[in-house]
Image (spheres, helix red, strand yellow):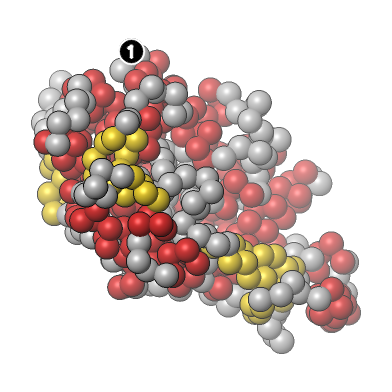
Amino acid sequence: MKSNNKLKIFNDPIYGFITIPNSLIFDLIQHKYFQRLRRITQMGLSYLVYPGAHHTRFHHALGSMHLMQKAVNVLRFKGVTISNDEENGLLIAILLHDIGHGPFSHAMEHSIVNDISHEEISLRFMQELNEEFNGSLTLAISIFKEEYPRKFMCQLISSQLDMDRADYLKRDSFYTGVAEGNINSERLITMLNVVDDQLIVEEKGIYSVEKFLVARRFMYWQVYLHKTGIVAEQLLTRILKRAKELVQQGVQLNCSEPLNYFLTSEVNLNSFDSDTLLIFAKLDDYDILSAMKEWQYHDDFVLKNLCEMIINRDLLKIKMKKKPIEKPELIAHTNMLMEKYKISKPEADYFVFNGEITNVAYQNKKQHINILLKSGKIKDIVKASDQLNLKALSKPVTKYYMCYPKKKM
């Protein structure tokens, strides 16, 4: 039987060499559930805006684990006691935190599965793997679920300054070429400490935190909430919804078996059992792409046109406003489409719709990034900072959009 070297290294374009710390982590990375992340793009359809954004959830998971290794070393150096088991739990929790993402990262959550988030699916994967690995993931699951008594460990996995964000901002900035998002994650981690079981940042790291929050705001408006990216994701969600609608009407659609299962079944949190998880694990971006390539030639007017729009990057027009879209404007576009193509209102609604997007760079009401001052006092970053705009970053900014076809469709 072939024996694998379990202490391999990855050459990452962001951090250089990433070392796999032990054989359990190696076996988890080698597992088919985790290898699937190579086929899930980190930023969905953002490559239609930024051509370089083809990096995957696999890249991001490894990068987050690498930063967690650094964070553990820094905290230990500063006298924070972290056992080997706790370190392993942290590394596994951050490695698997995104394992539940479906094709193109978020589209499935709003179309062919109901009321189940990728975090909940990630937890199901971790529980399944825990059985397979004889309980080795129990501590990691406890940290992931924020049930572990040492709160700072849960904050390293999920907070406003966690290893997930520390990686994806830097990584997404690199692959999109948007320099404004390039944070110094290593500097941020070096400034971390723990006081009263809470993760804090030492005062000399305050400017790095300010840069982190400003970079996050830039990345959301310029990249994650880019208007073309919004249109593309909305179209993909509508493609899957339309496909499900047609299949339920008895229309035959060519697609892979895993995708067909989710089109023909009503899947929600209660019905998402081990069998469903196994089928979900076979589903990735390629299933959706190959289906769209087939469906662009389908007889259904809605499905055909939606697929053509994404395949050929000939998307709907989008108008962004600071105030909600007036209904007469929507009705006018809907009526025009119905008259031109002799389609029903429900069909026209696939092409004419409105929505809203909200960006909050810092959620100070939900969680805090605390700064440890030289005096020993602990202050929220907004109060500790002399940057006036940080308070503004904690206020939600909402924009409203309307999508409708260009003159030719």
Q: Is residue 114 visible?
A: yes
User: Is the residue 282 above or below the residue 305 in the image?
Assistant: above
Name the residue located 35 percent from the left edge and 66 percent from the top edge. 386
Which image quadrant is residue 156 in? top left
Q: Quadrant of the C terminus?
A: bottom right
- Residue furthest front as drawn: 375
Camera-side residue of 249 and 90: 90
Camera-side residue of 387 and 344: 387
Q: Secondary structure at mark 1?
A: loop
Position of residue 113 in the picture relative to residue 169 (left or right):
right
Give, as a three-letter code, the residue at label 1. Asn
- Residue furthest bottom as drawn: 407
Camera-side residue of 400 and 214: 214
Name the residue located 43 percent from the left edge and 64 percent from the top edge. 390
* Label 1 CA crowd tier, 10 Å (few <14, some 14–19, many 20+): few
Q: Which residue is mark 1?
A: 134
Name the residue located 35 percent from the left edge and 14 percent from the top edge. 135
**Measured from the top left, where is residue 119 in percent x and y?**
50, 37
**Measured from the top left, where is residue 151 in percent x and y?**
37, 30
**Measured from the top left, where is residue 249 in percent x and y?**
81, 46
Name the residue located 63 percent from the left edge and 70 percent from the top edge. 399
Q: Quadrant of the N terminus?
A: top left
User: Is the residue 319 above or below the residue 220 in the image?
Assistant: below
Camera-side residue of 312 and 389: 389
Q: Is residue 170 visible?
A: no
**Measured from the top left, where is residue 166 in percent x and y?**
31, 52
